[in-house]
Amino acid sequence: MKKILSVALSTAMAFSMFASVAFGDTAVTPQQQFDALKAKGIFNGYPDGTAGLDKEMTRAEFAKVITKLLGLKEITGTLSYTDKNYNANNWAVPYIEAVTAAGIMEGTNVEKKLFSFNGKVTIQEMATILTRALDLEIPTETNNNAAAWAKGYVQAAINAGLIDANANFAGNASRELLVGAAYSIDQAQSLKVESYTVTEAGKVVEFKISDGETVKVTLDKALEANKETEVKFTYKDKEFTEKVTYVVTAATKVESVTTSNYKELTVKFDGEVDQKSAETEENYKVNNSLSFSKATLSADKRTVTLRIAEGSTILPKQEEAELKISNVKNSDATKTFSETVKFTAVDTQIPTVTEAKGLGTKAIRVQFSEPVTSLSASNIANYRIDGTPVSGYVTFSYPNVAVITTNVAVGEHKLTVSNVEDFAGFKTVPTESTFTVSEDTTAPEIVSSVANDLDEVVITFNEPVKAVAKAYHTSSGRTASEVKISDNTVTLKFSTDANKLSSGATTVYLEGVKDYSDNSADRQATVTPVLDTVRPTVNTVTSEVTSANLTKLTVQFSKSVSGDATVGSNYTLRKSDGTLYKGTGFSSEGHPVGTIEFVANKDNQEVTFTTLGDKLPAGSYTLDVTGIRDTRTVANAMAPQSISFTVSAVGDVALNSSWSEVYNTDYTRVYVNFNKAVATTGNGNALDVNKYSYVVDNAGTKTYHSFPASATVSQYDANTVYITAKTSDLAEFNTVGTTKQIRVSNVADNNGNFISNGSLKSIVDRSASTVGIKEVKAISAKKVSVEFVGTVSLVEDNDFIFASNLTPITTSFSKSNQTVNSDGNTVIEFTFSSDVLGAGTDLTYTTQGTTEINTKDSYGRKLGEVTSATAVVDAIAPTLETVKANDGAKTITLTFNEEVTIYNNPAAFVVYYEGKQVKVVNAVATPDAKVWTLTTDADANFEVGKNVDISLVNGSGKIIVDADGNATEDFAKNVKVTL
């Protein structure tokens, strides 16, 4: 404390022997200073009520002031001095002992132990005592006329501004002098923070101090919004630790994404969000695919409840999933959320009845604690009233309201509900809910009405609505195309252009609005539509490899879009360097040339298109999207947007095969072979036993089993793991006469591609497990490529038998190349000694018998026997046989060795006529599709003998392909015009 006070005083106290120190806004005189100190018990004053400022201080009085001022502990039971009347009854003893113990004051005669408590205090003594009390540094050089013993102390007090350098140091100090000094010290040690403000997004805190000053503190790290945090700073050499809270009303982050059932998600923000964007369902997606039918913002504007449509799928069960939040703004529009939050959906709660309510004497409204299935909630057999089965019917309003239509007497009743099921398969436990029935003689009243754009009106009533006879706006001819009733909400759709709402105030009429007591009335409401002015945007562009080894691109929009989204010219694909991608089903302008389609059941929010002939090479791409409008009455056009995405070098993880064997007598091992190297750390860790289970099929009855807790997973090689468990713990697995499958979820490769959840593959006995063949294809006139499932270590040529039109080929062949492709499969090329293949050749293959086969994989499994003739895929590219430039026309005829298709990309041809470039504007085939005629935009018809140069420059694309998707190679031909 003394150290703190000394530094604080040296900088804070403007002291002189005769000057007054300000007391806030009021204490500006010595008397006011005295009054303030008296209120704190530091000074007492004299019996007559006066301050005695002109009087001199005694040493006892000074001891008391120092004790009170510094908060020293008063000491009793100790008598350090021998002065007369220095005893336990002397009021000054506790204070004198306190300053003595603290080393601040000492006696006037140390040898005789005399304190002289009634003696006066000289200025040099006061300086000495203050220097000790405040732990001031005593200088080595002095310049004052104080007594020799006091020179250092006095100089320290002078240097600190406590006393005047010209004072009479031997003279007695007045009470006024001590009051001024004491007040300054008290003020210095009483400094406190009165208030604070947070600015610059939590980076700066400004503290208002009790002396009227403001201290600005710039933090290294901005304060976290709405979280109490300690901030430390030093002012006038006093250290402060203050708890501050950066209060932010607008949201700054997503606090959590949680769920307790499989149909709803709760998104909690740390502050308020904009209602319109927060309640836009299109702004939320689970795993980039699963969408929501309703988003509801809480009253405090901090929590959004997302609901999946009744007939749609459910949230991924008990596995980590990702919620992508896009375009949600906070309440002051300073932040737009675009982030992905991970969550795991787990439902462990049994659905319960939260309310049973009589709707007059003819119906009961039942509300459940969570979404339940329509089938179970609509079953009248699941309800009993007063222990008796109910006669009537149930109307279910998704997600959790059932209205039982039945006659019920006035009075109190008990409802029992059983077997109503949630989406986790849990059913209600029969429990009784008490409800009261009274007469209802009043028809439903409108509580609120809202018009969304020009085609939808949502009207909320004060009670559940049973029926609406007719709904229209403005005039009876403008009827609603759809009237949807859900509990107490009626939604009207006006889908035809002639019946849409006007943009101004519009009156909506509902005739025959009936409740469940059959009270009916006509109602009307005036609504002013709020036009949707939000432009559509692209949320994501994703790629995947199809079963045909093509790349499918999926473009997901933020809202429903029009047919513009299926027009290829609205999309432009660019490579990572920004140049146009011209191959694999894209035109020379980078536009997709294949069919673009809306994805079913995605409400026109997703389109897909697939490459032609082959998949996109791995790498980074950008898709430019423009010219697309939404489906609103007054369509909003999207601003041009460029979206980056990556095509992985590999596709999704898949299961190749699985087999089991007895290991070391007491253990069973189950091997799981993937199509590529799998991750052994992170979310996709393939060594987590919880990601595996097995399915036992016993005469058509399937049961699912987890591996025992004692089971372990080990890595055999990059593509294969094996699960080891005690055979005694796998009774179901080893049941005789059953078939088994391995079930794998949440395993990824090293590039983050995940296996399709719940992927299954049959488990066979090790002795019966074989190596499979994925594909055999002819790639040239004398070469065949064989792709095995998995990695093959030994390949024997003679294991394969080839035939043409069922006639064995006797020409010799041998292995010419062996590689492992991106799917982890071994590819072998066999080269024949002569040309035996060609376009249209009916080539098949079989293998040797099992006992003769020598081809094996690294696990020692043999190639599986192929006994029936299996077609060899035609992968031989078509060739251009002749080119003819036609006289008297502007056309060029191309003849190929087989039927081909030329995709609508005339710009892929570069044509020069007599050195001048002309464009190909059309391409038309003859009926057999071997011969194609290209029409150019030449200024005049071609003339005999003139030169025509034609080249195909489609890069890596597949512009000219045969029926099997094989593309012709680029060519460059020079011909003369002929008749």
Image (cartoon, helix red, strand yellow):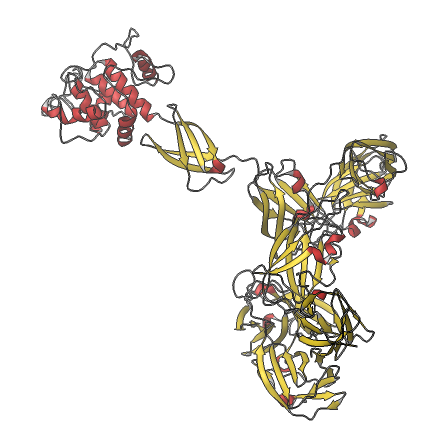
**x, y percentage for residue 944?**
76, 75
Residue 35 in the figure: left or right of residue 360: left
**Side of 789 where 514 appears, left or right:** right
In the rendered image, residue 668, in percent from the top left (x then y), is placed at: 58, 75
Vertical placement of residue 614 versus 162, above or below: below
> Where is residue 155, by image quadrant?
top left
Q: Is residue 755 above or below residue 781?
A: above
Which one is in front, 313 or 517? 313
Q: Residue 825's image quarter?
A: bottom right
- 338 vs 905: above or below: above
Residue at x 65%, y 35% (from the top left corner): 299
Q: Which of 848 and 699 is in front in this view?
A: 848
Q: Does 646 appear above or below 861? A: above
Q: Nearer the viewer, residue 687 or 941?
A: 941
| Residue 449 locus on image (x, y percent) | 77, 34
Residue at 20 percent across and 29 percent down: it is 103
The N terminus lies in quadrant: top left
Q: Can residue 267 be seen in this view?
A: yes
Decide if residue 347 is in sight here: no
Q: Among all residues in the image, which is located at the extreme top?
A: 48
Kindly identify the residue that appears in the image at 68 percent across and 67 percent down. 916
Left or right: 69 as drawn, with respect to 747:
left
